[in-house]
């Protein structure tokens, strides 16, 4: 039977090559590649016995646990489609995703049973429910949900599945920073090459050209990698796949929140080599724990710290280098829709969020209403765009799909939403989400760029920047800031420090100091909530 650029096919190839190597560690849970494969086979047979097959959607409504990745692989083995469900969603958001995603099954933590009961009526096709036992004591009987381990009793651990396809779907629901979640439809082959490095992430020969070559990319010594975001977040889910398909070990944190000391305990115990974070929201507590506990841990195993999905400021990168002088720092650009768009090539300090190299698959394209899309000229602004291995659209949303995937010169391009400029040297400077751009007196200000400058201030623990109404300039740059400890912070002091890093018109004109800056569990900014705080004015300081 032919093998394809299908994640299940390639995982099975890897599992056969290194069956006894540790694949997955989450708290007390451990599994080798062979054990993970066998358990996924059993779950796949259970799902298949419930009538679930190719193209059917299966929700994964779980905290970080081995069962999450077992569920993912089980779906892929029978050509079903796993759907990530954000465990922080409240009723309206859950109603939306259970309806929009057309789920026929859901694997969930026991504690989420009452939430599913509230929205089940909106998902008439949801027939199969499987719960992972926890200490919540939540009642699952009225849902008819079957306990996870019990479901697999008597199920075969063998591989007797049919042939799969490059075009089987991997759907990632993303809320971004605004709006209801959107299901990004990725064919397996496309997401493998766009988001997972095509099997070449850890190998000098780069991406593979045939599925069977995935075994040749496996190193003699596994890299132990820890992804700190929840698996429901694309950055973590994809990182886990990258590690597994390279024959490396994935370490997950079972904690419900990020506590720096707890993470470093795991890093020291498991001898983690590489840590994947989502921007400063994760970097700060990790760095604070290191500062507060000098010499507490043996962290000599660490050689890489990588970030993607949110701003990883220059000041935090430098702070990691102080603790790990020889560490390899990566600051990746990308999104749920684009996969990996490259790493920051440096660019001009204090200008934009970073700089990547233009290629036949990466460009900057105009997006002006009423005008045809075209590639920009050097020095011109536009939207960061990708071609080649891209998604096929948003599930159940043809309007959004048509706005995001456009044709330029006979080629399909994905518009990412980040504004960017093509430089004279043919590189691309990325500025941030155009939808969040602040127009103040005719000048364009990108919140992420201002946030990066503010975070260089030692008194600033975290911040978001939003636009608030201004009678003279239309909008003013407004900062919502959480202070570090008992640090004193005034608007004047914030402005004075910011002017060392950014132009005067980008400096905040208003300051709101809060205990905690609003963010999603993944670390992504919650700009609408930050704007509500600013408009309410209860935390404004002079």
Image: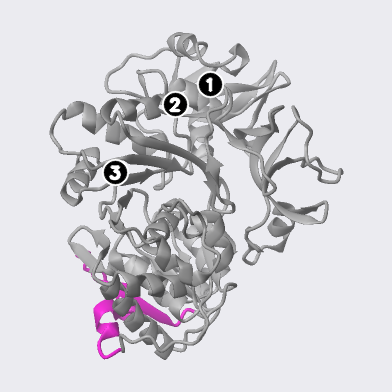
Residue 81 in the image: state x and y as whole percent.
50, 73
Q: How is the image coloured?
A: one colour
The mark nearer the N terminus, 2 or 1, is 2
Task: Give the alpha-carbon distance from disc 2 to disc 1, as whole Å.
Answer: 9 Å
Between 346 and 77, which is closer to the camera in this rendering? Answer: 346
Task: Name the element at disc 1.
Answer: loop
- Number of dots carrying numbers: 3
* Residue named by callout 2: 314
Q: Residue at x 29, y 43 (%)?
A: 258
Q: Residue at x 22, y 33 (%)?
A: 289
Task: Name the element at disc 2.
Answer: helix
Start and end of the magenta stretch?
126-155
Residue 235 in the image: state x and y as whole percent.
45, 51
Q: Is residue 100 above or below residue 306?
A: below
Q: Residues within 10 Å of mark 1 (few under 14, many from 20)?
A: few
Return the mark for residue 349. 1
Task: Name the element at disc 3.
Answer: loop
Return the mark for residue 258. 3
Task: Give the alpha-carbon distance from disc 2 to disc 3, as whole Å.
Answer: 21 Å
Left or right of residue 498: residue 225: left
* Closer to the eye: label 3 or 1: 1
The mark nearer the N terminus, 2 or 3, is 3
| Residues at discs 3 and 1 in contact (Cβ within 8 Å) | no
In the figure, residue 221 lies in which quadrant? bottom left
Q: Residues within 10 Å of mark 3 (few under 14, many from 20)?
A: some
């Amino acid at each position: 039977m032919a093998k394809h650029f299908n994640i299940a096919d390639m995982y099975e190839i890897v599992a056969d090559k290194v069956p006894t190597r540790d694949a997955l560690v989450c708290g007390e849970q451990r599994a080798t590649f062979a054990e993970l494969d066998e358990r996924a086979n059993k779950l796949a047979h259970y799902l298949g016995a419930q009538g679930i097959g190719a193209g059917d959607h299966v929700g994964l409504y779980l905290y970080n646990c081995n069962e999450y990745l077992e569920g993912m692989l089980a779906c892929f083995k029978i050509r079903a489609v796993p759907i990530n469900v954000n465990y922080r969603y409240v009723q309206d958001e859950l109603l939306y995703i259970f309806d929009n995603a057309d789920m026929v099954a859901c694997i969930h933590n026991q504690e989420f049973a009452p939430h599913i009961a509230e929205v089940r009526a909106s998902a008439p096709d949801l027939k199969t429910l499987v719960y992972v036992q926890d200490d919540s004591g939540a009642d699952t009987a009225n849902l008819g949900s079957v306990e996870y381990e019990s479901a697999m009793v008597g199920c075969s651990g063998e591989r007797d599945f049919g042939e799969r396809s490059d075009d089987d779907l991997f759907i990632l629901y993303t809320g971004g920073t605004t709006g209801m979640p959107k299901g990004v439809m990725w064919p397996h082959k496309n997401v493998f090459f766009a988001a997972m490095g095509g099997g070449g992430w850890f190998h000098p020969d780069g991406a593979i050209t045939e599925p069977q070559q995935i075994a040749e990319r496996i190193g003699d010594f596994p890299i132990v990698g820890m992804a700190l975001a929840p698996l429901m977040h694309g950055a973590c889910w994809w990182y886990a796949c990258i590690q597994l398909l390279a024959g490396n070990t994935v370490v997950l944190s079972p904690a419900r929140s990020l506590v720096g000391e707890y993470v470093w305990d795991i890093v020291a115990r498991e001898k983690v080599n590489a840590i994947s974070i989502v921007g400063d929201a994760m970097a700060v507590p990790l760095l604070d724990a290191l500062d507060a506990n000098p010499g507490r841990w043996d962290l000599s195993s660490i050689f890489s710290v990588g970030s993607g999905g949110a701003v990883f400021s220059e000041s935090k990168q430098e702070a990691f280098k102080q603790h790990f002088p020889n560490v390899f720092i990566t600051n990746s650009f990308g999104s749920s829709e684009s996969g990996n768009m490259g790493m920051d090539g440096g660019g001009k300090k204090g200008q934009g969020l970073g700089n990547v190299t233009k290629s036949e698959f990466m460009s900057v394209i105009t997006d002006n209403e009423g005008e045809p899309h075209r590639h920009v000229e050097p020095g011109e602004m536009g939207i960061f765009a990708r071609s080649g291995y891209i998604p096929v659209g948003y599930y159940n949303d043809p309007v959004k799909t048509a706005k995001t995937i456009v044709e330029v010169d006979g080629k399909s391009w994905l518009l990412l939403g980040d504004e960017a400029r093509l430089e004279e040297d043919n590189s691309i400077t990325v500025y941030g989400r155009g939808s969040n751009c602040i127009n103040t007196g005719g000048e364009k200000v990108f919140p992420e760029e201002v946030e990066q400058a503010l975070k260089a201030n030692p008194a600033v623990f975290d911040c978001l920047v939003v636009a608030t109404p201004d009678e003279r300039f239309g909008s003013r740059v407004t900062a919502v800031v959480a202070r570090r400890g008992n640090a004193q912070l005034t608007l004047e002091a914030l402005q004075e420090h910011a002017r060392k890093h950014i132009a005067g018109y980008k400096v905040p004109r208003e300051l709101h100091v809060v205990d905690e800056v609003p963010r999603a569990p993944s670390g992504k900014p919650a700009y609408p909530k930050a704007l509500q705080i600013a408009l309410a004015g209860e935390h404004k300081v002079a």
